[in-house]
Each structure stands twice: as C-alpha cells, then as structure tokens.
Image (cartoon, grey):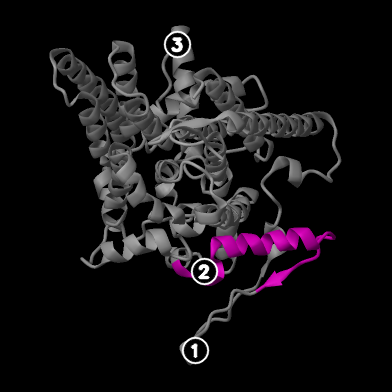
Amino acid sequence: MNDTNTRTTATLLGVGLFWCYVAFSSGSISGQGYAGEEIKSGLSMLSRATAWMKGQPLPPMVWSRHGALPVLFDLPFLKLGKLIVSPDFMLSFSPALFTAGLVTFLYLWLRKLCSPGMSLFLSLTAGFGTMLWPYAYIGLETKQSFFIFLAGYLALADGKIRAWPRALLLAVVCGLALGLKATGITLAPVIAYLYYIQFRDNSGSERAKILVSALIIAGIWYFSHWSTNAFWGPRGGGGTSLRPWLIDSPISPFINLVGLFGSPAKGLFVYAPPLIASIYALPRAYRKCRELTIYAVLVTACTLGFLVLLKYPADEVWGPRYLHLIIAPLTLCMGLAWPRFRWRSEGFALVVLALLGLVISSFGAFYYYGVRDFAMTEASQNTLERISGDNDWNHILFNARLFQVWLSNTNGAPVLWTPQHIWVWVPPSDAPPWKTVNLTKYCSPQSVVLRFWHAPKQGRAETVLAVYLACLITGVFLLGCVVLRTIHEQRTWTVKGEDGTFEAV
C-alpha cells in the first residue's frame, strides 16, 4: 500500500463526505436532542471568557448534561457563528465533520486490510447505508463514536507505539472517548484492552508511558465527571435521574438484548442493514486478527452491558442511537473477513444490504426525527411504549409515508391519516376514538435546499441556498475523484499470499 496515495484518497473522501453531508443540512441543530443545552453552555463559556479578559464580573455558568468536555469542541463553531449567520447555523456543521472524520479513519484502517475497492465500498456503505448519515445532522453520538474509533486506530492499526508524542496522543484520545458522555466510563474495558495490547511487554519505558497515560486519562475523565455533576447535582444527581429508567425484572436484559438488534421499531439491523453481514464476518475476522476483533466485540459488549439494564434502551431519536459507536468497528470486521469484493460469494448480499441501508438511512436524513413525535402528540399517542414498539408509528415507515406525500402532493392539500389499532377483540366502552392527523403539516424535508427549492429566493436566503448547492457540487466532484483514484489503485493493487504476490481482482 502506497501511504501517500492512500492518505490523499482518504483526505478527498473525508472532505467530499463532509460537503455532501452539509449540502442536505437543515442549517440548525438546536432542536436536535440536548444540542440546545450545549449551545447555551458554549455561549456561556464564551461570555465568561470575554468578561474575564475585559476585567468585568463573570456571568453565571450554564452547564449541560454531559459536562463541559463536549462543549469545548463546539466553541470554534459557536465563535465563528457570531460572525457568520448564527451560532446555531455554524454548529450544524459539527456532526457532519465528526461523521466524515470517522468514515475517513475507517477507510484508512480498511486500506491496511482490504483492496482499494472493498475499502471504499465498505466506507461509503457505512457513510450512507447506516445510521451514520442521519446522525450527521442529529449529532448527539458523533463525538464519542469518533474518538473511541480513533483510539482503536492509534492502538491497533500501526503496530507498536514507541515515540512519546504518539503515546500522549493515544492517552488524550482515550480520555476523550471516556469523558465525552456521562456514560462513557462504561467503555473503560475497551481502553484497558487497548493499553494491554500496546504495553504488554512491560519494559521500563513502557511502564513510564502507562503511568503518564493513566494520569492523563484519569484527569480528562475527572474534569468531565466534575462538570457533569455541576449539571446533575442541582437536579438530585445523575444516579437519581437514572434510577426510574432501570429494569425491574431479571428477564429484561435478554429481551432488551434481542430488541436492540432485531426490534422492528428500534433494532440496529433494521436501521443499519449492512451490519447483518457482521454476524457472519466476526468468526472469520477473529481467525485473521484476534486483537482487532476483540476490540470491536468489546466496544459492542460494553455498550450493550449498560443498555440492557434500561427499561427502554432506545428513545424517540432515529433508531437505536446509543449503538451508533459500534457501527464503524463492526464494519471494520467485515473488511477483515472479506478483503476482496467477490460477486460469487458474499458480494451480492453485501450490495443488496448496502442498497437497503441507503434507502432506510435516506428516510432518516430526509426528515427531522421530531416530526414523528409532533404527529404522535397531535394523535395523543406519544408514549415511549408506542415509540419503542408500535408498528403504526415505526419511524422508517412513517418517514416513508411522509416522503410519498411530499412527492405526490404538490398542491399542499391536506392528507389525512388515522393511526388506528386493532382492539383485542372488543374495544372498551369508554375508549376514545382514534385521532386523525394531517400528514401535509409534517412532510416538509429538513434540508434547506429541498425545503426552499421552489420558494422565492432573494437576499440572504439566496446566498445560503447557493452555498449549499456549491457544497453538493464540490462533494460529488471529490467523491467522483475518489472513485477514479480507487479504480486506478485497484488495477495495480497486490497482496501477499501463501504462494507469493498476486494481483487482486
């Protein structure tokens, strides 16, 4: 593998993905989960810094639920947003950047294991055929997913860490992976395993690296824990807030475990169909590279170990969002198991799953996830039980229904829909009638370009639309360059087999 060519291709891929993601952005992120809290916290930090530099009294600090650490990554966007459009607008670029970065490192790691064509196929499949695409707009999980994968890349992809700068970089990345979310400590076994693989020789210099790294990781996590408590402390503590959500039956972990992968309403394999192939890939990947496969399984197991203890291990957001961070590691195992694309064996199935994932993920990226909740509220059916298991309110089917209305209903006429349910078998005498909702109110796409394509364009709106269209053209052009480079690299790519060097096809 030519490192220079590979890094150039990876850079083009990452930049191209970023601009393609941005092209279909809503231009706002404050309504995505707790992003609004983090915007307020970040603006509070900037205000306090400004007051301190001017020698003025410091305004009160506003904290967010996951502490100050993730907000620090938002500060450059928020600061720039004070100059360009708004902080909310500029921060909407952040999840797209972290998602593109995650796919870029996935590609770089795959290139050490796979042919150029297979590496690009799996990277684009992850980028557009799984939950990574919708979450390039939703955010929430993108920072932690990026850093836990980057930690694995630094520890496992390039062999032994001998230089101090790289050892310190690994420590900082591992600390961020643990501290970017209040629940990040559940990933501690993953970090411990990475350090075991790197420093198991236990020589004198390695013991010093382990000690310094442990101090860095502990310091980053403690800062995150302290700032998280500043938010939850006045609310009775994080444990008190979590307690009502914990299971009350010993059989619930098994039910939750199956549902996290196979639930029609919230299953990972439903919202990221390509990962179905990882079931078959893991045994083969384990035989080829035990360390990498154990890393992927540990990330999955640590995440599941916490989620199965919750009554509802998924919320109203698109798909099982807490499983976002296992998508890249499992995709990596697929590349390890199948380093070359072969139509006659697994290739056809992978393409079918990738196309299915592309369709499903496009529905998640097309609409703001909250429109379903608005409709459920109007229908008086907005309970977590219905969100987690009601087929009438299945997020994929609901968004597909909205998409059909958006395509066919060009005149904006009301399209009435009644989410009726089947009583077993006689309805109660005092049962209220099912309410009807107007789908036309909810079928507007979140993308600025699509939402205002036919609207009058003038002034600032015209400029914003032109910027988004330029992003789309640039992103498609760069991804086209990546495809052409990959075709050229594929023709000259060779791998070392038992019988010598042979050209891959």
Q: CA distance from mark 2 to mark 1?
A: 17 Å
Mark sitting earlier along the chain (2/1) = 2
Foreground residue among 6 and 37: 6
Q: Residue 405, relative to residue 492: is it above or below? A: below
Tell me how many marks there are: 3
Whether residue 68 can be seen here: no
Magenta range is 389-417
Q: Main secondary structure of the magenta part?
A: helix
User: Is 450 positioned to the left or the right of 489 in the image?
Assistant: right
Check if mark 2's residue and mark 1's residue have beta carbons within 8 Å: no
Q: Which residue is mark 1?
A: 427
Whether residue 291 can be seen here: yes
User: In the rendering, which numbered label is found on residue 381?
Assistant: 2
User: In which quadrant is the C terminus drawn?
Assistant: top right
For the residue marked with disc 3, what is the amino acid?
Gln
For the residue marked with disc 1, what is the amino acid?
Pro
Point out residue 391 in the picture as x, y percentages from the top left corner: 52, 71
Q: CA distance from mark 3 to mark 1?
A: 66 Å
Q: Which residue is mark 3?
A: 56
Q: Residue 101, relative to residue 299: is it above or below? A: above
Q: Nearer the viewer, mark 2 or mark 3?
A: 2
Point out residue 135 in the picture as x, y percentages from the top left corner: 53, 43
Q: Residue 173, relative to residue 21: is it above or below? A: above
The residue carrying pointer 2 sits among few (fewer than 14), some (14 to 19) or many (20 or more) residues within 10 Å by Cα, namely some
Point out residue 107 in the picture as x, y percentages from the top left corner: 50, 33
Please say whether residue 412 is one of the residues in the magenta stretch.
yes
Task: Tell me the element at label 1.
Answer: loop
Q: CA distance from mark 2 to mark 3?
A: 50 Å
Point out residue 60 in the picture as x, y percentages from the top left corner: 40, 25
